[in-house]
Image (tube, grey):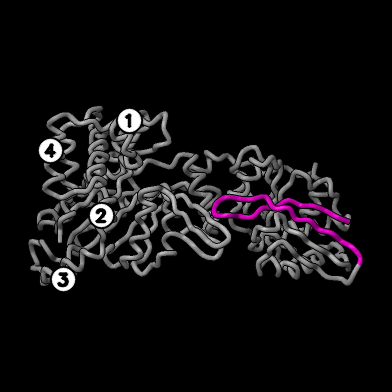
Amino acid sequence: MLARVWSAALLGIEAIQVGVEVDIAGGLPGIVVVGLPDTAVQESKERVKTAVKNAGFAFPMRKIVVNLTPADLRKEGPSFDLPISVGILAASEQVPPDALAQTLFLGELSLDGALRPVAGVLAIAAAARSLGITQLVVPVDNVREAAVVTGLKVFGFSHLSELGAFLNQPEQFSPAAIDGLEELQRGQTSAPDLRDVKGQAHARRALEIAAAGGHNLIFVGPPGSGKTMLARRLPGILPPLSFEEALEVTQIYSVAGLLKHKGSLVNTRPFRSPHHSASGPSLVGGGSFPRPGEISLSHRGILFLDELTEFKRDVLEYLRQPLEDGYVSISRTRQSVSFPAQFTLVASTNPCPCGFYGDTVQACTCTPRSREHYWARLSGPLMDRIDLQVAVNRLKPEEVMQTSEGEGSTLVRKRVQAARDRAQTRFRNTPLRCNAEMQSRHLRQWCQLDEASRTLLETAIRKLGLSVRASDRILKVARTIADLAQEDLLKPSHVAEAIQYRTIDRLQ
């Protein structure tokens, strides 16, 4: 007898519907799996056979052919264990085949019949809804993740025997019910507070501008000046994730298999901080079956690169295209996938190899040639893409000893939210979310300069040798500064403040 069960395969963060056809006929007992299965899928034959027996079902001692369609799509991972086993049960008439028509199955099987969680369930649930699938059956540990998708009945089971009971008597089971907005508010963690930072008014202002406009930021200063401390407080002043943004981020983490301890939704903006020994593929993603890297895991959040100049130059060059386009494209012989990568880059570095160039306390021991070689690790095109370049100086003794607290993150976040609200009103008929995402056509519309501001910017371009990209970044930052001041028109003071954040372009 022939039975067909629906499942799905992942291509990047997209899901493709896969048909699992099972035919039981005469011949030598055994299971044959066709349809470009990888090693994990081939190994499912033994897992399925043992799990079906241990779950209390009869395993047919006949020839079983399993066909995974479409045949030209590579199938990977253990998530096909469950649909194959259900197909065998249906083809052997141990469960009614009619119950499978509008249901999609996902799950890994243990030898005792227990269902184990798999990656990418949220992406597959979203795709199933768009394909007209009405029911999704997953392991119980994946049910909260899948149930976030509305318009889809999600059932979670811990054992194959429970699933058999459901297929034979579905009226006795109820789908999972999850309130997505409630999940978004559940267990949100608090970021370090800005009130812990002493002094550094200039750097604190840069953090506020970066948060309000989504601008990339680099801190340059001697060891112990507080660069890393400042950077780790940026998440605390960012606006909270919207429900749509949370779904985007959760889908990436689900595909990467990093959602096990994050509940059904990632409800805080990501903050990723890879070590400087990280490789290029670990940043952008990769593998024979491409998986998202640190850049995509930072989507809608922050990618923090501490000690930026310690990263290999060729690794840093991987950042250029994602910073400009907001996505990562990975090409392989059989496939090409894209991962979203709209993140804020925050970096820190010392001004020279010894770390004390320009320091007011300790003298620099580096030669001009060594400083030049040090900064040559950062290419001009990469630095052009960093909007805010901030020098962080060592604290003065009186600042170190001060006991009064600085302004807290809560107050700063309110100003940031107000600035973002102004930007959202301006962008209401566009896909833009923040000022950093503006293109040249948007700058001509929303960043018009009066004569004084134009002259000021032209002088800066001439004296600093700024590129066209760098000058556009100045306009974006000036637009954010105006939004923080609750003003519609750009003024010379806004442009002047934005220009001062480009002075490290010439620090060598």
Residue type at the position of mark 4: Leu
Task: Note whether residue 218 is visible.
Answer: yes
Q: Amino acid at mark 1?
A: Arg
Q: Is residue 271 magenta?
A: no
Instruction: Tell me the SS state at disc 3.
Output: helix
What's the magenta bit mostly, secondary-structure-wise?
strand
Q: What residue is pinned by disc 1?
A: 422
Q: CA distance from mark 2 to mark 3?
A: 19 Å
**Of the image marks 1 and 2, the number of the one nearer the N terminus:** 2
**121 left or right, relative to 470:** right
Q: Residue at x 63, y 46 (%)?
A: 125
**Label whose residue precedes the other's in the sequence (3 or 4):** 3
Q: Secondary structure at mark 1?
A: helix
Give above or below for 30 relative to 161: below
Give the magenta part as a residue range. 1-26
**Badge 2 or badge 4: first in the primary sequence:** 2
Label 1–label 2 contact, CB within 8 A:
no
Q: Residues within 10 Å of mark 4 (few under 14, many from 20)?
A: some
Task: Give how far apart the Cα atoms at labels 1 and 2 are.
Answer: 28 Å
Query: What residue did someone put label 3 on?
Result: 370
Q: Is residue 351 left or right of residue 158?
A: left
